[in-house]
Image (tube, rainbow, N blue to C red):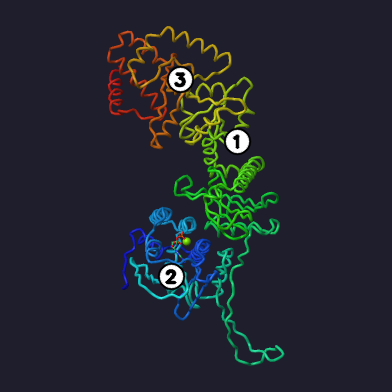
Amino acid sequence: MAKETHEFQAETKQLLDLMIHSIYTNREIFLRELISNASDAIDKIHFESLTNKDLLEGDSNYEIFLIPDESTHTLSISDNGIGMNREELIENIGTIAKSGTKIFLQKMMEAKENNSAVSGKELIGQFGVGFYSAFMVAEKITVITRRAGDKQAYKWESAGDGSYTIEECAKNKRGTTISLTLAPEFYGDKAEENFTDTNKLQSLVKKYSDYVRYPIKMNFVIEETPKDKDGKEIKDAEKIKRDEIRTLNSMQPLWAKNKSEIKPEEYNEFYKNLFHEWEDPMEVLHNKAEGTIEYTSLLFFPAHAPFNLYHTDYQPGLQLYSRHVFIMDNCKDLLPEYLRFVKGLVDSPDFSLNISRELLQQSRELKIIGRNLENSILKTLEKTLKNNREKYEKFWAEYGKSLKIGVYGNMYSGNDTINKLKDLLLFATSDESKGLTSLKEYIERMPENQKKIYYATGKDRKAIDSLPQMEILRDKNIEVLYLLDNVDEFAIEALHEYDSKPFHSISRGDLDLDDVESQQTKKETEDITKKNESLIKDIKDTLGEKVADVKISNRLKSSAVCLVADEKGPSFSMEQAFAEANNPMFKAKRILEINPHHQLFDRLQSIHNLGKDNPQFKDYCDLLYTQALLIEGILPENPADVANKIASLMSQTK
Ligand code: ADP
Ligand code: MG
């Protein structure tokens, strides 16, 4: 095969461009990225060799080598991992296949446009752009690689200028050697950062890659004064040089150490290393279980929910190890779906090394461990909520949605999840001074004669505050939960009740207020309804399909109308959530409620007296309904038509 030249994919070009001209200062992380790729490649050969020993070609001494060379100003990172064939080189290094990287690119572009230097660091840490980060320090990258089991090796080369070349070459050992030809700023004694300096490299490995499972080795040239027979240094003798290969990383798996011997910084460093995070975790849970099932778990809550936590491209799951040997990444079968934000690992001698994912799913041990982990996570959360409200609310801001999805998602599961989660939920409330409230706290504040837990939905506090339905509850000093998140109402629906108190939306069905005054209003409303039967019927007929019913309201004070949803079926906000999820089938049944004490009602009566077919009555009905829609934040189907009607009405007034 002759040397071939390939163009980078357009997106790769952009990324390269950003890397090369990056305003980014923390360039040293390229080493972590390349080492972690090498370590991943060794994981892969290790894993494949479990079913195909021949791949190892007799070499199972896994190792990563750093080879700095000041004279050629290169730094090479060499591994005896899985290697790559030609197709893999093109696929893995020539294109950006991962959606995470694409989003990274987009964000970087935005950050660049906004001239914000901060985001570079955050973004690179978050997205682990990996291989390409090497272009921050290298003017040319050469990859020489041979896939385990293949005879032919390939050389890939690029100056990061839009294209790369591939040609055949020879390589004795399997695996990959990546050689960076360093840019002038990055080698030599006068360099701002010298990446051919062994001490510098050693400290970088300690900092970023200490727990890498495989030895990272480097040759050190030791200068010594020769010694005489008795071991004494010979005076004035010329120094001699000798080579010494040292392993730079401790490889000590942190989780195997005793909890009491581990400093918080060690947990943090370990976490950042293993998961390519740049921020310390918000929670660390380290447990050792002995007994029927033996395991160690080390779990973390990332400081911030990842941008794609709820998307399909997010990879949830824990790492599995058996006696410190890595078995598998992203094992989803340990933790329930709603805890998908938890990162970490489980090490158990009960896991067998070459177990398949399918078999693992059925493993009894895994189920038991999973249940224990879930319980200990929930216990930690309970404790935090009880003892450190501020910390819990931080957690809630990031992962509250997950718990609510957990409640909703387990509506029909028949397990106990809802019960376990219900006390961990927080909601905003009409009483702003209370901040976020748990259901328990709400109940404790509830007056004795209140039978229900009232809630309202809206996109923000203001939207709910201005709902006409809120007025009466405010007047009666009844606390209302403010459901501001799309999933809130779904969770509430799934809970159904708390402490035997049913949930009740202020925009649905009868409010069921129990005080004397309310009973009176109710009776009064019934009377007015009777007296206005034909009016109500005619409004309903005029609006036709648009409404399921028209009623005289007992919940309105100063507003003329409101729209409520039927108690059966979805609410308006659920309707909107369904529509956003491309599922517009679920429509709330609309009930138009009219305030009989509003002046508009008198007017309506007199217009109605002129006959239900008179055009003004029709316009009035339409506009009443539209008003009610607008209050709920729903746009009318034909806004222009509505505007015309309003204009015409306005010009009629004297
Ligand atoms: P990531 O490691 O997150 O997949 P990178 O940009 O770091 O992204 O690497 C891209 C891909 O290139 C890797 O997924 C892997 O397939 C391949 N690769 C990189 N370095 C090596 C290596 N040393 N040995 C084998 N494959 C590698
Ligand atoms: Mg990588």
Which residue position holds label 3?
A: 558
Between label 2 and label 3, give the one nearer the viewer.
2
Q: Residue at x 53, y 70 (%)?
A: 64
First in sequence: mark 2 vs mark 3: 2
- Answer with the quadrant where ligand 1 appears in the image: bottom left
- In the rendered image, the quadrant that contains the N terminus is bottom left
- In the rendered image, the quadrant that contains the C terminus is top left
First in sequence: mark 1 vs mark 3: 1
Q: How many numbered circles does the render carry?
A: 3
Between label 1 and label 3, give the one nearer the viewer.
1
Query: Which labelled disc corresponds to residue 416?
Result: 1
Q: CA distance from mark 1 to mark 2?
A: 52 Å
Q: Are marks 1 and 2 in contact (CB under 8 Å)?
A: no
Asked whether 90 or 608 is in front, the reply is: 90
Q: Are marks 1 and 3 in contact (CB under 8 Å)?
A: no
Q: Residue at x 37, y 64 (%)?
A: 87
What secondary structure is marked by label 2? strand
Give the left or right position of residue 600, taking residue 513 as reference. Answer: left
Asked whether 490 or 18 is in front, the reply is: 490
Give the amino acid type for the residue marked by disc 1 in the picture.
Asp
What secondary structure is marked by label 1? loop
Residue 96 rendering spot, x and y as whole percentages: 39, 58
Confirm whether residue 648 shows in the render: yes
Image quadrant assignment for residue 265: bottom right
- Residue neighbourhood size for the residue with mark 3, other residues' Cα within 10 Å, grouped as few (<14), some (14–19), many (≥20): some
Which residue position holds label 2?
A: 146
